[in-house]
Image (cartoon, helix red, strand yellow):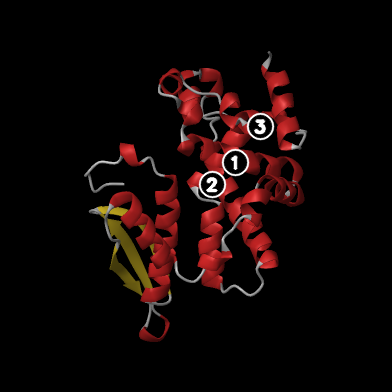
């Protein structure tokens, strides 16, 4: 099957037809492929990934504000982090079969790059950016709303207020350990201070987050760590404290 016909099939899966199909091609091009092909040099998806991350934050934030009007800014932030986490986006990308369409270098191909959560999540962000550049904000919003509908509707609102408890239960069940929180930074005057907190489990730092109070920063860090832990390959973890 030719690349053009492959892209037509992906467009049907996405529910969006590109006017500039080269944007979709770039969104699917990993840097390993670009590095090995002179014709693709510099045309990988990393900048599109950067832009797509911003578009996703804006779109999902808007959708969550509409869906949960009573949540605070902090609660909306950690909920958005849940929806657009690597685990969440890679799951949606896998359901789309996005890995099949990736343009990878030989090394990534040999090591199973088409199934790596990080590559799938990055490609999904890049595709969102490609739709944004091709069709504008409304087109990207419709795409995100359609593809993330199940995740948005399946959010567990009962746990909004205590991610620390959720993380503790998960860490004890999966790692037989208790999370530890450390203040790693403070900024601003006393009346408007921001705290940065890191959460560690078994000497490994799992997440960092900032907040206007230590409690808020801890909750945000706990939320991010909980989503990472949910999607982690526990067999692949070792005692190295580096994530």
Residue at 44% of width from left, 45% of height from top? 231
Residue at 54% of width from left, 61% of height from top? 79
Q: Name the residue under label 2.
A: 88
Instruction: Please report whichever mark, 1 or 3, sits nearer to the chain's N-terminal start.
Output: 3
Task: Kindly state the secondary structure of the residue where label 3 is placed.
Answer: helix
As measured in the structure, the alpha-carbon distance from the residue carrying label 2 to the one carrying label 1 is 7 Å
**Side (left or right) of 214 relative to 78:** left
As measured in the structure, the alpha-carbon distance from the residue carrying label 1 to the one carrying label 3 is 17 Å
Residue 9: image quadrant is top right
**Side (left or right) of 137 relative to 160:** right
Q: Can residue 81 be seen in this view?
A: yes
- Provide residue 8's location: percent of width, then percent of height: 74, 25
Task: Kindly state the secondary structure of the residue where label 1 is placed.
Answer: helix
Q: Name the residue under label 1.
A: 92
- Provide residue 242's location: percent of width, then percent of height: 27, 47
Residue toward you, 97 or 230: 230
Residue 213: image quadrant is bottom left
- Provide residue 148's location: percent of width, then percent of height: 65, 48
Q: Name the residue under label 3.
A: 24
Cβ atoms at labels 2 and 1 below 8 Å apart: yes
């Amino acid at each position: 099957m030719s690349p053009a016909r492959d892209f037509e099939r992906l467009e049907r899966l996405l529910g969006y037809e590109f006017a500039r199909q080269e944007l979709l091609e770039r969104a699917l091009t990993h840097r390993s492929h670009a590095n090995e092909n002179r014709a693709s040099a510099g045309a990988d998806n990393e900048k599109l990934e950067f832009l797509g991350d911003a578009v996703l934050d804006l779109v999902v934030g808007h959708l969550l504000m509409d869906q949960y009007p009573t949540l605070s800014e902090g609660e909306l932030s950690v909920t958005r982090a849940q929806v657009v986490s690597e685990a969440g986006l890679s799951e949606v990308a896998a359901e789309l079969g996005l890995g099949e369409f990736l343009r990878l270098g030989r090394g990534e191909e040999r090591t199973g790059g088409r199934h790596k959560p990080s590559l799938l999540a990055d490609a999904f962000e890049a595709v969102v950016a490609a739709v944004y550049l091709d069709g504008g904000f409304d087109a990207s919003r419709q795409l995100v709303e359609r593809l993330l509908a199940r995740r948005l509707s399946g959010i567990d609102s009962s746990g909004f207020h205590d991610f620390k408890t959720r993380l503790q239960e998960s860490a004890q069940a999966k790692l037989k350990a208790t999370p530890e929180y450390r203040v790693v930074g403070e900024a601003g005057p006393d009346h408007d201070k921001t705290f940065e907190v890191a959460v560690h489990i078994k000497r490994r730092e799992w997440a960092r987050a900032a907040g206007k109070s230590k409690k808020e920063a801890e909750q945000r860090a706990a939320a991010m760590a909980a989503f990472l832990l949910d999607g982690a390959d526990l067999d692949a973890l070792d005692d190295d404290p580096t994530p």
